[in-house]
Each structure stands twice: as structure tokens, then as C-alpha cells.
Amino acid sequence: MHNHAVRRARSAAVAATSVALLVAMTGCGRGEESSGSESKDEVRIAIVTRNFTNPYWAALRDGALAEGKKQGVKVEVQAGASETDSTGENAKLSTLAGQNYNCFGVVPVNATNVITPLVPVAKKKIPILNLDTQIDAAASKQAGVSYASFIGSDNLSAGQQAGKALLEKMGGKGDVAILQGIAGEQNGINRQKGFSEEVAGKLNIVATQPADYDQAKGQTVTEGILKAHPKITGIFAANDTMGLGAAQAVRNAGLTGKVSIISVDGITAALEAVKAGTLSGTISQYPYAEGQLAVQACINLVRDMKVPTRIVAPIALIDAGNAAKAISSFPQPFVPFANPLTAAGK
């Protein structure tokens, strides 16, 4: 699905920024000093994420690989076996750390799991990008690991946008439930905080339960919540896979159209569900663009060009009004966004 989508025409904004980056690189390609047998400018990027089962991480992989191919640089993307497989992810990271890569991009399972396998990378002064999910700054500093940049969405804002959307769908009042992600995972914490702040004093949060970013768990947890709190008219799911599980539970209970559901990510299945009316909306993030940005940032870092310490990937509310447009643009953002890595984005 993603490979087919990768071949689609890029949006004007992304195309413009990529061209500008290419021009910038051509102008900087003079540094041929070698630290060993390789050219200083030879870029070899390793990216590690949680898993490829979740279409969100598969899209990040596809964006990185497509950008690597376009820019003519080596990109390797590996992952653990599930959203919570920190052991598997760390094993992949440790193996890659012992190989000849000169820039790393890492999506952690939780705030601290990747720090230890990143120590050898940091000791070699190889630049590391923290992707999508924040790694604990204090614990990293203590271990001697630092990050050249954080590339990801504003999850607090995603939660706030979800709160606004659900308030509108619920008519500004009513009982609502929250499906949380993995316990202690910062993105989910930020999304819940943004949502809770937005609906405070208006919606009554009657249940808050983790479903580990898993569709089957999302369905099971929602079934339990609907039985315990039959007056619920809204659900906020911290990601789309849980949102789709919640939608199935709502459908099974014969409550489609009576219980509004907003989730976060913008994966294809969620966009289709929004179009079909089984999901009220999704706060779409753009993991494909995050993968592209990671490769662009690594190229800049290897070639001694500046990279901002925080690069915000775009988000947008997808509802019935723009779902078709979002589907046709997928996996590209359907709205332009400023790319700080290129002249066109300044």
C-alpha cells in the first residue's frame, strides 16, 4: 500500500523544499576530506523504529527510504516486532551501532529504552536524531547521549485539536472516555494532557484506560467502558489503531452516530473510516514526511550544515469534509508546511 503510494506525485511544497535541499547540497559538496577511506560527505543513515505492523511506522520507513533513494544516500530502516518490543528494538539498534553508519534516527518505545544502545554511537560523536517520541533528556545527559534534533509533531497541540473537534461533535457537553497508549510513553501523555485541558469544565471524562496503541485492545477496552458508562457520547483515542478498535466496539453496540470518536495519526484505514462515517475524525500526522525530514536532516549533519534543534512535522484535523482530499494526497501532507531544513522553508 505504501510502496504504491510512494510513487504518487509529491505535493508542491515538499517538491519545492526537496529541490532546494538538493541545490543546497550541490553547493556544499566540496568537502572531500576523508576521516578514513570514505569521503566526509558520504552519508550512511540508520533509522530504528518500534515496528512495521503499525502503518504509521511503515509510512515513516517508506518516507525515509524514498528520500534516501531520491538523494542518492544509503538509508537502512529497522524495527522491533511490536509497539512495546523495547528488547527487539534495542537489539537492532545495538547491531547497527556496530556498523558503519554516520547518522542515526531513533523512535523509542518509551522515554529511556534506547539510551543504553546509543552510548557507543554518542562516544563516536555520530549525530543522533530523536524521532517522533521524546527521549528523556536528563537520563540521556547522564549517559552522555545528546541529540542533534527532535523531529516530530506537536502532540500537545494534537490533543488540543482532538478536544476541540470532539467538543463540536458532542455539542459542547457530555460524558467522554479516553483510550491511552503505552504507559509512560510521552506522545500519549502529551495528547491526553492537551485533550484534557481543552475539554476541562465542558466534557466529563468518566473513564481513562490504556489500550497500548493496539486495535484489538482498543475494541476490548471500549466494550468494557460502554458497559460501565452507557451514557458516553464521545471517545478520544490516543492513536488511530485504538480509534478503529473503539469504532468497531461502538458499531457492535449499535451506537454508530451516537458516540463520536476522534483519534490521532491519519493512517489510511482511519482516513477511510472517517470518509465512511464510522470514525468522526483523526488528527493526521505525517510520518512519511517525518521519514523524509530525518533523511534530509542527516544529510545536513554529515555535511556540517546547520539543523534546527526542533523540527515540527505538520498535523491537521481530517473530518468528513476533507477526508477524500487527504486520501488522495496520502502519504503526503495535503496542506503545505514550512520545512526549516531548506531555503524554501525559511
Image (tube, helix red, strand yellow):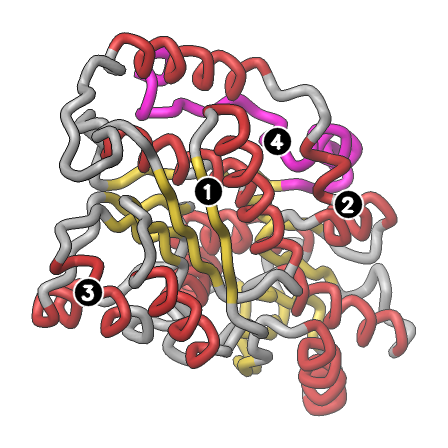
Q: Which residue is mark 2?
A: 1
Q: Which residue is mark 3?
A: 120
Residues at circles 2 and 1 in contact by the CB criterion of under 8 Å: no
- Residue at disc 3, secondary structure: helix
- Which is nearer the N-term, disc 3 or disc 1? 1
Residues at circles 3 and 1 in contact by the CB criterion of under 8 Å: no
Residue 249 falls in image quadrant: bottom right
Residue 108 x/y as whole percent:
38, 65
Give the mark toward the camera: 4 or 2.
2
One can see residue 179 in this view: no
Q: Is residue 100 magenta?
A: no
Q: Residues within 10 Å of mark 2 (few under 14, many from 20)?
A: few
Residue 152 x/y as whole percent:
39, 46
Residue 341 falls in image quadrant: top left
Q: Is residue 340 magenta?
A: yes
Indicate whether 79 appears above or below 304: below
> Viewer-proximal residue, 52 or 337?
52
Question: Mark 3 is on which residue type?
Answer: Pro
Q: Which mark is residue 332?
A: 4
Question: Mark 4 is on which residue type?
Answer: Gln
Question: Mark 1 is on which residue type?
Answer: Val
- C-alpha gap between disc 1 and disc 4: 20 Å
Q: Which residue is mark 1?
A: 75
> Viewer-proximal residue, 313 or 189?
313
Indicate whether 34 appears above or below 202: above
Give the mark toward the camera: 4 or 3.
3
In this rendering, position of residue 31 left or right of residue 5:
left
- C-alpha gap between disc 2 and disc 1: 20 Å
- C-alpha gap between disc 4 and disc 2: 14 Å
